[in-house]
Image (tube, grey):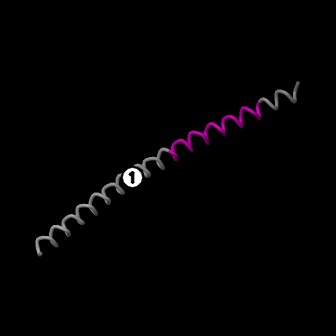
Amino acid sequence: MDWQISLLVFGLGGVMSLLLSIIAYFLKLLVQDIRDLKKDYGDLRALCIGLKAKQTELELKISKS
């Protein structure tokens, strides 16, 4: 009977360890995606600032014509 309880405890410990490993893996992927999104957001923001400047420049050229 004792060996069955020990086996059950070891089995549950193994399952818990596996589940925690899976959760850690997905959290790592989530953190990496957030970092990538921040970088992409910075690039997109810089592009938008450049486009707004170009738009203003073109509007000035059109208004002078």
Q: As drawn, is 24 to the left or to the right of 45? A: left
Secondary structure mostly seen in magenta is helix
* Residue at image location 23% in from the left, 65% down from the top: 13
Above or below — where is 20 with respect to 31? below
| Residue 15 picture quarter | bottom left
Whether 39 is among the magenta residues is yes
Give the mark count.
1
* Residue at image location 85% in from the left, 27% down from the top: 62
Q: Which residue is mark 1?
A: 26
Residue at the extreme bottom: 1
* Residue at image location 36% in from the left, 57% down from the top: 23
Q: Identify the image quadrant of the C terminus.
A: top right
Write the start and end of the magenta stretch as one range.
37-57
| Residue 7 picture quarter | bottom left
Closer to us: 33 or 2: 2
Q: As drawn, is 46 to the left or to the right of 63? A: left
Mark 1: few, some, or many residues within 10 Å (few <14, many ≥20)?
Answer: few
Whether 8 is among the magenta residues is no
Q: Identify the image quadrant of the N terminus.
A: bottom left
Residue type at the position of mark 1: Phe
Above or below — where is 37 with respect to 57? below
Residue 34 image offset from top left, x and y in percent: 48, 50
Q: As drawn, is 33 to the left or to the right of 60? A: left
Residue 10 image offset from top left, x and y in percent: 18, 66
Label 1's element? helix
* Residue at image location 28% in from the left, 57% down from the top: 18
| Residue 52 picture quarter | top right
Residue 50 image offset from top left, x and y in percent: 66, 35
